[in-house]
């Protein structure tokens, strides 16, 4: 059962992005339309905000944008907190420029606000949230919609083409590519909605944090005050907020795209990756803006096509898949044949098992794997060509397949700025059993194809690069007694 879909949203040009999360109707007698953002942290070309403006204009109500950051999300750390707060700061600034009010709350001992989103919703006509298929955004949106007495609508902001537009019957990457390519040109143009109602200036049920005017030092103080993992420092590789994203877009145009087709698989070449994934994950940029940058670049057509395929086919395929999964981060999402063959080999001798401490810090007996892991540990990011080797080797370095999966998710989610994402879970699943099974092969792996480090080690400077990458200085982190597994069972939310 769903609510009556408001006419304004039904007539909106991007209505295919919207779905109802509960059965409540919109209440026109309200102070504002609430737009609650968790991960799509941008004010421009943000379909969640646009949908809220569309509804607000129709009702004659302003839009109030809200972003809050709790301390108790899984793997909360200085690295994640600082990156998120930098994005939230720019969200506040850009909302103001767009004629929208935004309010922000950073959870800490000196400033607690229990049930804040429910209190904000009490004065709203409806609540617009982002339609995220993984991790905290999914859990919290679903739980809020079930408990709230306000209409809640979820809007996809992560993909160029709304996944719902493509149907529910696509079973392969090639079929997805064909259907996606047929319509993607229709979605390349951004059209920010203009609010026709002045920005909200009315009462609020709390005192907001003024993130829009915060300096970097003030953000650092907010991070330091939070009860989070302070052993994992921020990444110097990814500057904060909109300025960091713009610098990556300029780098994409000038340094990456001209040679992308030739060097994208070379982890030793800095020009082989866009390094945009953290900014995409937290919604600081969207796929339309990246595609506009690609179109404007002076680069070979083949390079542009390859990057578009990575961004629009593979990334959006993983988002499409995640929608149909109860828990995209769950072990049972890998192929049935892969689970069967890994189970059949689960009792094989495993002489390469490593401790969680050695795995987390990249101090195993495998130099190439350490080089991969140190990118996660130090940079909060890993080159795509290294991820498959990294993921497959974990199967042999842990006691059983389920622990291998939980370990891969744990390392990805705790350390990487683009972890906790449909794309990174999809990549891990590919490592464990994507594509077709091979012949029943080596111990432990069975029919799951293995992967060597040859694509990096056999390059002219490969051995030297791997040694240097594996011995980079990194932080000493607090290590749990065992890899967490309960967060990866049927979308179970944290406390």
Image (spheres, grey):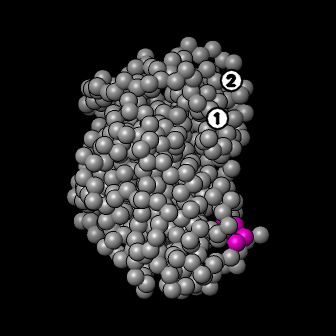
**Which residue corresponds to the image point at 58% horizontal and 30% vertical from the top-left?**
484
Residue 27 higher or lower than 395, as above or below: below
Q: Is residue 54 left or right of residue 215?
A: right
Q: Examine the image and state in which quarter residue 88 appears.
A: bottom left
Residue 83 higher or lower than 390, as above or below: below
**Which residue corresponds to the image point at 72% horizontal and 70% vertical from the top-left?**
23
Question: Which mark sits nearer the N-terminus, 2 or 1?
Answer: 2
Instruction: Report x, y in % for residue 382.
Output: 39, 39
Instruction: Report x, y in % for residue 411.
Output: 48, 33
Q: Is residue 468 shown in magenta?
A: no
- State the extent of the magenta-drawn residues as a range: 19-24
Instruction: Report x, y in % for residue 431.
Output: 55, 38
The overriding secondary structure of the stretch rendered in magenta is: loop
Residue 318 higher or lower than 189, as above or below: above
SS for dot 1: helix
Q: Along the line of sight, which residue is nearer the eye, 58 or 343?
A: 58
How far is mark 2 from mark 1, CA to CA? 24 Å
Which quarter of the figure is the C terminus placed in?
A: top right
Q: Along the line of sight, which residue is nearer the eye, 338 or 424?
A: 424
Query: Any mark on residue 168, and which?
Result: none
Residue 418 higher or lower than 483, as above or below: below
- Toward the left, the furthest residue is 254
Query: Any mark on residue 345, and which?
Result: 2
**Which residue corresponds to the image point at 61% horizontal and 20% vertical from the top-left?**
399
Q: Would residue 117 be seen by someone viewing this image from the given angle?
A: yes
Query: Any mark on residue 486, and which?
Result: 1
Q: Residues within 10 Å of mark 1 (few under 14, many from 20)?
A: few
């Amino acid at each position: 059962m769903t609510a009556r879909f408001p006419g304004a949203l039904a007539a909106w040009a991007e209505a295919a992005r919207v779905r109802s999360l509960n059965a409540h109707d919109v209440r026109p007698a309200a102070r504002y339309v609430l737009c609650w953002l968790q991960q799509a942290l941008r004010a421009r070309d943000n379909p969640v905000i646009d949908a809220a403006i569309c509804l607000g204009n129709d009702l004659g109500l302003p839009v109030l944008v809200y972003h809050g950051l709790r301390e108790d999300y899984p793997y909360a750390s200085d690295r994640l907190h600082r990156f998120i707060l930098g994005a939230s700061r720019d969200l506040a600034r850009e909302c103001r420029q767009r004629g929208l009010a935004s309010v922000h709350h950073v959870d800490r001992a000196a400033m607690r606000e229990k049930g804040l989103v429910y209190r904000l919703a009490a004065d709203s006509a409806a609540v617009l949230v982002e339609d995220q298929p993984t991790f905290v955004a999914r859990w919290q949106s679903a739980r809020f919609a079930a408990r709230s007495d306000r209409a809640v609508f979820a809007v996809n902001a992560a993909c160029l083409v709304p996944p719902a537009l493509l149907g529910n019957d696509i079973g392969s990457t090639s079929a997805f590519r064909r259907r996606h390519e047929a319509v993607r040109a229709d979605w390349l143009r951004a059209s920010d909605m203009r609010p026709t109602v002045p920005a909200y200036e009315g009462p609020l049920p709390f005192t907001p944090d003024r993130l829009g005017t915060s300096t970097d030092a003030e953000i650092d103080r907010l991070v330091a005050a939070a009860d989070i993992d302070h052993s994992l420092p921020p990444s110097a590789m990814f500057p904060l907020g909109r300025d960091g994203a713009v610098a990556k877009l300029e780098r994409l145009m000038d340094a990456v795209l001209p040679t992308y087709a030739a060097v994208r698989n070379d982890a030793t070449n800095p020009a082989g990756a866009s390094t945009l994934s953290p900014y995409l994950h937290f919604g600081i940029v969207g796929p339309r803006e990246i595609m506009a940058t690609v179109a404007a670049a002076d680069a070979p057509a083949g390079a542009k096509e390859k990057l578009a395929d990575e961004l629009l086919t593979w990334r959006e395929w993983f988002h499409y898949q995640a929608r149909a999964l109860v828990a995209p981060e769950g072990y049972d999402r890998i192929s049935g044949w892969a689970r069967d063959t890994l189970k059949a080999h689960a009792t094989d001798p495993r002489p390469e098992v490593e401790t969680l401490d050695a795995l987390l810090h990249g101090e195993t007996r495998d130099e190439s794997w350490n080089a991969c892991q140190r990118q996660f540990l130090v940079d909060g990011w890993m080159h795509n060509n290294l991820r498959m080797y990294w993921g497959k080797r974990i199967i042999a370095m842990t006691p059983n397949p389920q622990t291998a999966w939980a370990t891969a998710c744990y390392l990805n989610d705790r350390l990487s700025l683009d972890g906790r994402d449909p794309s990174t879970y999809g990549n891990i699943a590919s490592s464990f059993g994507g594509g077709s099974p091979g012949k029943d092969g080596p111990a432990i792996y069975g029919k799951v194809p293995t992967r060597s480090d040859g694509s990096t080690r056999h390059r002219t400077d490969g051995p030297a690069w791997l040694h240097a990458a594996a011995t980079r200085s990194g932080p000493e982190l607090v290590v749990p007694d065992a890899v967490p597994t309960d967060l990866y069972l049927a979308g179970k939310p944290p406390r």
